[in-house]
Amino acid sequence: MSQNRFSNYLLYAIGEIILVVVGILIALSINNWNEDKKERQKEIKSLVELKDNLKSNIDEFNKFMSNQNRYIENISQIVKYKESNLNYHDSISKYFSGIGFLEQINITISSYETMKTYGLDLISSDSLRLEIIELYDVHYNHFERLIQNVGLALFSGDVLPIRNKYYLINERYESEEFLYFLKDRISWKKDAIENCNFISERTKELMKSIEEELDKME
């Protein structure tokens, strides 16, 4: 009888231990599920914000390319007049607007910076994470350096000397070296547009990838 009671107590104790362990495992599983759910919600929020920033960047790129194309048209018109040996007159002055401006671009990176504070491992898709990093840390950085460094160098080396040497527009127009300056400006602006179009397409591709990832997470 004593052995039976001991066996019953032992079985009861083992049963209690099993119940406690199972309870702990269930609680851990629920907690992990809740944490995973929070992480996925944070990931979705981050991707939505990133997509909105990318849309703003595409608008900025379109604006940049539109402005540069307009300046190219103005410069080309002046080149046409000069190569036709047309003397300067007041109606030509309107084409001078903006041709010597320092190029500027404002790429929005706030959502990417926020994402980095969370940790980029927040993005569950390895391929999407790499695509995001490549766009921001490679393509965007390269384009910003191109516009800032090359643009500033050309502005300092070409634009300012012409302005300082020929203060009046008509004197600038009549000078022979102004023609070479204009052609250099056209070449540089076409390069800037080509590079801008490249990263604009990469931005659209990333937006598409994000949309596809968000669709999977719904």
Image (cartoon, rainbow, N blue to C red):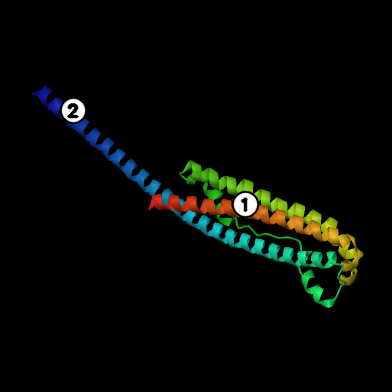
Q: Is residue 72 above or below residue 37?
A: below
Q: Which numbered disc, 1 or 2, marks the residue that appears first in the sequence?
A: 2
Contact (CB < 8 A) between labels 1 and 2?
Answer: no
Q: Is residue 119 left or right of residue 80?
A: left
**Mark 1 or mark 2, whichever is nearer to me:** 1
Residue at 76% in and 55% down: 187
Residue at the left extreme of this rendering:
1
Q: Which residue is mark 2?
A: 10
- Residue 19 bears which disc, if any? none
Give the percent coordinates (x, y) of residue 149.
Answer: 76, 52
**Viewer-proximal residue among 146 and 90:** 90
Residue at the front extreme of this rendering:
84
| Crowdedness near tag 2: few (<14), some (14–19) or many (≥20) residues, C-alpha within 10 Å | few
Give the percent coordinates (x, y) of residue 108.
Answer: 60, 58
Q: Quarter holding the N terminus?
A: top left
Q: Amino acid at mark 1?
A: Phe
- Residue 198 bears which disc, if any? 1
Residue at 48% in and 56% down: 48
Give the percent coordinates (x, y) of residue 81.
Answer: 82, 68
Give how far apart the Cα atoms at labels 1 and 2 are. 74 Å
**Viewer-proximal residue among 108 and 36:** 108
Q: Is residue 96 left or right of residue 27?
A: right
Q: Amino acid at mark 2?
A: Leu
Q: Is residue 67 left or right of residue 158?
A: left
Q: Is residue 16 above or below residue 38?
A: above
Residue at the bottom extreme of this rendering:
90
Q: Give the SS element for disc 2.
A: helix
Report if residue 113 is visible in the image. Answer: no
